[in-house]
Amino acid sequence: MEFKHIPVLLNEVIENLNIKPDGKYLDCTVGGAGHSTEIAKKLNKNGILVCFDRDEDAICASSSRLSVFCNVHVLKTVEDFKTFALKSSNKPTAIICKTNYNDCEQVLKELKLEKFDGILIDLGVSSHQIDTAERGFSFRQEAKLDMRMDTSSLLTASDIVNTYTEKELADIFFKYGEEEFSRSIARNIIKEREQKQIETTTQLASIIEKSMPAKIVYSRGGASKKVFQALRIVVNNELEPLSNTIEFLAKSLNFGGRICVITFHSLEDRIAKDVFKELAKTCVCPSNFPKCVCGHTADVKLITKKPIVAGEFEIKENSRSACAKLRVAEKI
Ligand SMILES: C[S@@+](CC[C@H](N)C(=O)[O-])C[C@H]1O[C@@H](n2cnc3c(N)ncnc32)[C@H](O)[C@@H]1O
């Protein structure tokens, strides 16, 4: 199946990255290389683009697309990372790594590439992942409940739905989906489980729909969206490590380098906003101190006080961009 994903806020990301032709860039979520292709086009033969993704389909699609503009190296194992050595080349170099961006500290150390002029994290799932029915991300298409971005990882959505307690399920739906009917959905999952395993996306979607008033089902336009988001977040451990990762990456920038973070829901956006705010603090003295004695200096300055959002035209072309928010910070 062809890898289809329209990059969101593409011009805004490229403008904000201030790309230097011989610079070093890191795309933590390369997907179909929508953003990375535009970065690569601006690099010269000394430019380096490191790309991460934990999805094999993304590694495949991005390496083929980037090979038009770059000398591409695809690295998939710890051994590959350790033995990689940069060679001079007649095109920009793209190093595409199948890895979790939360392991960036270790991977970048192994690659001996520790400082960047620009970094992008475009969070969440790709349209390719959602639209490939058998990946089990979509409540609109019948498939096994899976939702793993890295199909070699162990935990699936089915494991969660079929083994977690009623309280654990309700807590997940509330915390990661902000689902107001979390308790009744969890209760009905347990009831159904007593009769038979919940194996498919559509089976779960119908339990969810039965757990809320009909008028909500119709008004939401996708009654299962919040629960599916919550399950996806847990299956892929999307939120717990994010704050540390953004902090580490922001500190991995060269002076004047920029980090762009694109988020798609309020839980992600709050994390990005809080980390940037913390890194931009010029003083960490307790608030009752009459004057600053900490000598603390900020790591970054905020380029976007308010997040950049998609314009009307982009939203019309790509409805997925409607909830995207871009935050940018610059290393000082
Ligand atoms: C929104 S898509 C990125 C699309 C990309 N910017 C483009 O223009 O094609 C998000 C990608 O991040 C990947 N991803 C999500 N969490 C990840 C993680 N922790 N480590 C590595 N990749 C991750 C997903 O597999 C997916 O391909």
Image (spheres, rainbow, N blue to C red):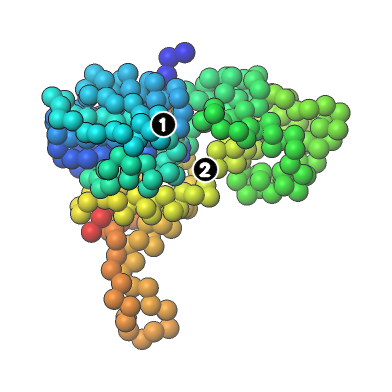
**Residue visible at 55% across and 42% down in the picture:** 237
**Residue visible at 24% across and 34% down in the picture:** 85
- Nearer the N terminus, badge 1 or badge 2? 1
Q: Residue furthest right?
A: 195
Q: Are marks 1 and 2 in contact (CB under 8 Å)?
A: no
Q: Is mark 2 on a helix, strand or loop?
A: loop
Q: Quadrant of residue 163?
A: top right
Q: Residue 238 carries which label?
A: 2
Label 2 lies in ligand 1 vicinity (Cβ under 8 Å):
yes
Which amino acid, by three-letter code, is at mark 2? Answer: Glu
The answer to whether residue 261 is above or below residue 192 is: below
Q: In which quarter of the image is ligand 1?
A: top left
Q: Position of residue 137 (x, y in %)?
A: 58, 28
Q: Where is residue 162 in the image (x, y as percent from the top left)?
A: 75, 34
- Residue on which the image places disc 1: 77
Q: Is residue 306 visible?
A: no
Which amino acid, by three-letter code, is at mark 1? Answer: Thr
The answer to whether residue 329 is above or below residue 18 is: below
Question: Front-most of 171 and 148?
Answer: 148
Q: Where is residue 238 in the image (x, y as percent from the top left)?
A: 52, 43
Q: Residue furthest top?
A: 1
